[in-house]
């Protein structure tokens, strides 16, 4: 178009916005949680997806300008999922496998599971996933039941794990 200059005010870019590599920034949508490839459910909220590295402080004699920090162990907090009540029983089958009758039937041996948390867009396409190692459920909380309440029925799941890796999907993939 006449009068348009590359990179000028009419270039399509708005001041203060940044779109990395031509892809729209990820927004919170829904979060799919799977264990060993089996969908446990789609959750509204996920908390605790983090890692912290402990450091050992080393004070060097004669060096008063700083303290050396040596990397130590990685600490992975529990992850908590929240969602509305679902019809799937996959979560409870996983609990039984880890601590119930199926656990006892397996000579009280824990079979290590892998898990994945994926951000899923409105079309059901994956945008980003975190692949969890050695996943195990440690707590489930059911909805508060009251005939006098109009609140949404919510359940909560808490898991432990031994770390994760991440994976991005350029165009989304199932």
Image: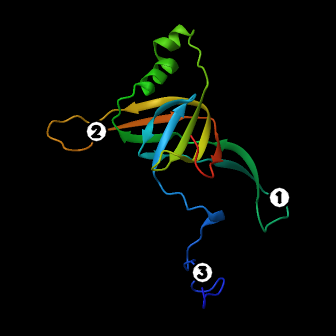
Callout 2–callout 3 Cβ contact below 8 Å: no
Q: Residue at x 27, y 43 (%)?
A: 152
Quadrant of residue 22 in the image?
Answer: bottom right
**Residue at the front extreme, as displayed:** 1
Residue 106, position in %: x, y?
56, 10
x, y percent for residue 143: 30, 35
- x, y percent for residue 130: 60, 43
Task: Name the mark nearer the viewer: 3 or 1.
Answer: 3
| Residue under numbered circle 3 | 11
Which one is earlier in the sequence, the residue at label 2 or at label 3? 3
Tell me whether the residue at label 3 lies in contact with that at label 1, contact meaning CB atoms closer than 8 angstroms.
no
| Secondary-structure class at tag 2 | loop
Kindly identify which numbered label has been placed on residue 143: none
Query: Is label 2 or label 3 in front?
Result: 3
Q: According to the image, label 2 marks what residue?
A: 153
- The total of numbered circles placed on residues is 3
Q: Is residue 35 visible?
A: yes
Position of 18 with respect to 57 (left or right) is: left
Distance from Cα at disc 3 to Cα at disc 1: 55 Å
As drawn, the residue found furthest toward the left would be 148
Q: Secondary structure at mark 1?
A: loop
> Circle 1 sits on which residue?
60
Q: Quadrant of the N terminus?
A: bottom right
């Amino acid at each position: 178009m006449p009068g348009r200059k590359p990179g000028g005010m009419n270039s399509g870019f708005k001041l203060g916005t940044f779109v990395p590599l031509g892809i729209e920034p990820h927004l919170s949508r829904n979060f799919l949680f799977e264990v060993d490839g089996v969908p446990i459910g789609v959750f509204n909220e996920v908390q605790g997806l983090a890692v912290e590295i402990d450091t050992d402080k080393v004070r060097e004699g004669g060096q008063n300008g700083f303290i050396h920090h040596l990397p130590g162990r990685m600490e992975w907090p529990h992850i908590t999922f929240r969602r509305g009540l679902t019809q799937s029983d996959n979560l409870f089958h996983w609990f039984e496998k880890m601590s119930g009758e199926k656990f006892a039937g397996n000579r009280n041996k824990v079979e290590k599971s892998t898990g994945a948390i994926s951000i899923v867009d409105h079309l059901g396409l994956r945008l980003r996933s975190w692949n969890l190692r050695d996943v195990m459920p440690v707590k489930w909380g059911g909805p508060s039941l009251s005939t006098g309440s109009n609140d949404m029925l919510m359940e909560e799941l808490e898991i432990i794990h031994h770390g994760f890796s991440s994976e991005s999907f350029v165009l989304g993939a199932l």
